[in-house]
Amino acid sequence: MVATLLEPVRVFTSYRDSVIARSQNTTNSLSTSLTELLFETKYGLRLEFCRRNNSYLIKICDTSNAVGEKNADHTNRCYHYRILPDWQTSFIWQNDPRDDCVVEDETVERLYPALAPFFFAWRDVYETEFERQECHLGSHVEVFPNARARVAWEMEGFFMSCWLASQNEVESVEYYSSSKTCRVEKDMMALELHKFLGNMGSLLEM
């Protein structure tokens, strides 16, 4: 059961090794240690496998301590974001009754400099595949050539949503994958992760 649940993680680390700073080889059986690192990204997100009293928890931690530009707007507001793949947009919006708008690249770079280059690279993967498959010309085919490529990209988007939701000033992040929408919040992150891993695992089995 654990091996099946972790298969989307293996797919992510194999396809997107450029974003991985450290990883554990999850192809083999996990060790018997209480807490084991599965991977750490270059922007500071860690995924850990924790054993507790004959049960387990897959836990996300932010170790980056990365802080963007400090200003009154950044420190005094609670942000609600949504990340939505939409060709030729920034892929990120701010959900706010007063200011529901696209978040421009310059704002991402200013507020979240540790994440920005990896977020832009992730977006470029989608844009490239979208045009390669001629989706912009109305081909109506899948953006990604196979399920593993799709799962790797979806997992990366979810992990970045988790990193963003971990920041002090961020209340929640809605992540729109091609199969479901997740609302990522600090207190519910582990639960959403387990649900998302199960969903991605089902895609790999199709």
Image (spheres, rainbow, N blue to C red):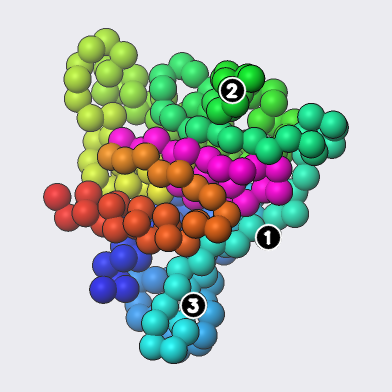
* Identity, as a three-letter code, of the amino acid under mark 2: Pro
| Spatial CA span between label 2 and label 1 | 31 Å
Crowding around mark 3 (Cα neighbors within 10 Å: few <14, some 14 to 19, many 20+) is some
Position of residue 77 relative to residue 7, above or below, is above
The numbered mark, 2 or 3, whose residue comes first in the sequence reads 3
2 or 3: mark nearer the eye: 2
2 or 1: mark nearer the eye: 2
**Residue 8 in picture, x, y percent from top left:** 34, 57
Regarding residue 91, the answer to whether it shows in the image is: yes
Callout 3: helix, strand or loop? strand
The numbered mark, 1 or 3, whose residue comes first in the sequence reads 3
Residue bounds of the magenta highlight = 158-178
| Spatial CA span between label 1 and label 3 | 17 Å
Horizontally, residue 81 falls left or right of residue 114, namely left
Q: Is residue 159 magenta?
A: yes
Position of residue 78 relative to residue 193, above or below, is above
The numbered mark, 2 or 1, whose residue comes first in the sequence reads 1
**Which residue does the image show at 45% across and 68% down from the upper left?**
58
* Identity, as a three-letter code, of the amino acid under mark 1: Thr
Q: Which residue carries the number 2 mark?
A: 97
**Residue 201 in picture, x, y percent from top left:** 26, 57
Q: Are marks 2 and 1 in contact (CB under 8 Å)?
A: no
Callout 1: helix, strand or loop? loop
**Which residue does the image show at 53% across and 40% down from the upper left?**
173
Q: Which residue carries the number 1 mark?
A: 63
Regarding residue 24, the answer to whether it shows in the image is: no
Q: Is residue 162 magenta?
A: yes
**Which residue does the image show at 47% across and 84% down from the upper left?**
52
Front-most of residues 1 and 23: 1
Q: Are marks 1 and 3 in contact (CB under 8 Å)?
A: no
Horizontally, residue 108 falls left or right of residue 88, namely right
Q: Which residue carries the number 3 mark?
A: 50
